[in-house]
Image: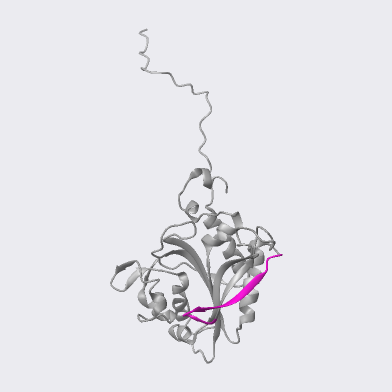
Amino acid sequence: LQETAKPAGPGLDVTLPGRRRAAGRIHPITATAEAMKKILLGLGFSYDDYPDIESEYYNFDALNTPAWHPARDLHDTFYVGSGQLLRTHTTAFQARVMRASGGQVPIRAMTTGRCYRADDIDASHYPIFQQLDVFAVGRGFTMSDLRWTLTELAKGLFGPEAKLRFRPSYFPFTTPSAEVDVSCVVCRQQGCALCSRTGWLEVLGSGMMRPEVLRAGGLDPAKHQGFAFGIGVDRITMLRHQIHDIRLLYDNEEAFLRQF
């Protein structure tokens, strides 16, 4: 019998073990967002996704920020068509939820996703960032309900020893409004470079919903009250993992992501 011709090149050793592909990992921003959602779902809030491309009405006007309002200057950025833009905050979902409810209260809702602003890139700013927005509307809601909700969220994220501090602030869509600080997760309020030796870290903005926002959602502010707060998921991720540069979260460097 004629010998079969052998293929050119090195032979294949079928006894060698195969090369396994490295298992993927959940991105730290996604993991943080899921942790926050899990805590709030346990407190009775419902979750839904909303589009990244939003109308001027829901992004601005329904949140008491008309075209002449000074607070709109920092957000008037990425327009993609007539009256459409890349949302500058997930707060734009509030009027949509209230209108969809048909006036049925209480409402406890949240969403999370990408937001877009024309920020210069540095260690703490990026044109794209992730935000979690939460609100509740019903009869008799007060700042005490807001504080309790935020306290439970902080303890779930940073541990049972986490403390909160409220500072008066201003937002067009809430009155009264407050910036909220959490006790430093690194130095335990002893003072360090991360908290600028103050023992506190600013994490979110919050407040009681303005009557204009409730009316835009089809609710009567004389009968209903609500509270709302928005959190930068990127900031919380950086605090939980002691990351000092937001750019690391978006560079997609494998050496960095393999740590999580």
Can you name the residue that lies furthest to the bottom here? Answer: 222
Can you name the residue that lies furthest to the left here? Answer: 82
Can you name the residue that lies furthest to the right here? Answer: 161
On the rendered structure, is 180 left or right of 14? Answer: right
Per the rendered image, the range of residues in magenta is 161-176
Query: For the stretch drawn in magenta, what is the main secondary structure?
Result: strand
Q: Quadrant of the N terminus?
A: top left
On the rendered structure, is 7 left or right of 223? Answer: left
Front position in the image: 9 or 133: 133
Can you name the residue that lies furthest to the top here? Answer: 1
Query: Whole-percent x and y of residue 15?
Result: 52, 23
- Could you tell me which residue is drawn at 60 percent across and 64 percent down? 38
- Using the rendered view, name the quadrant where residue 159 is placed: bottom right
Query: Whole-percent x and y of residue 149?
Result: 63, 73
- Taking the image as drawn, is residue 148 in sight? yes
- Could you tell me which residue is drawn at 41 percent across and 67 percent down? 51
Based on the picture, tell me whether residue 24 belongs to the magenta stretch: no
Front position in the image: 226 or 13: 226
Query: Whole-percent x and y of residue 238?
Result: 56, 57
On the rendered structure, is 44 left or right of 4? Answer: right
- Could you tell me which residue is drawn at 64 percent across and 80 percent down? 144
Based on the picture, tell me whether residue 167 belongs to the magenta stretch: yes
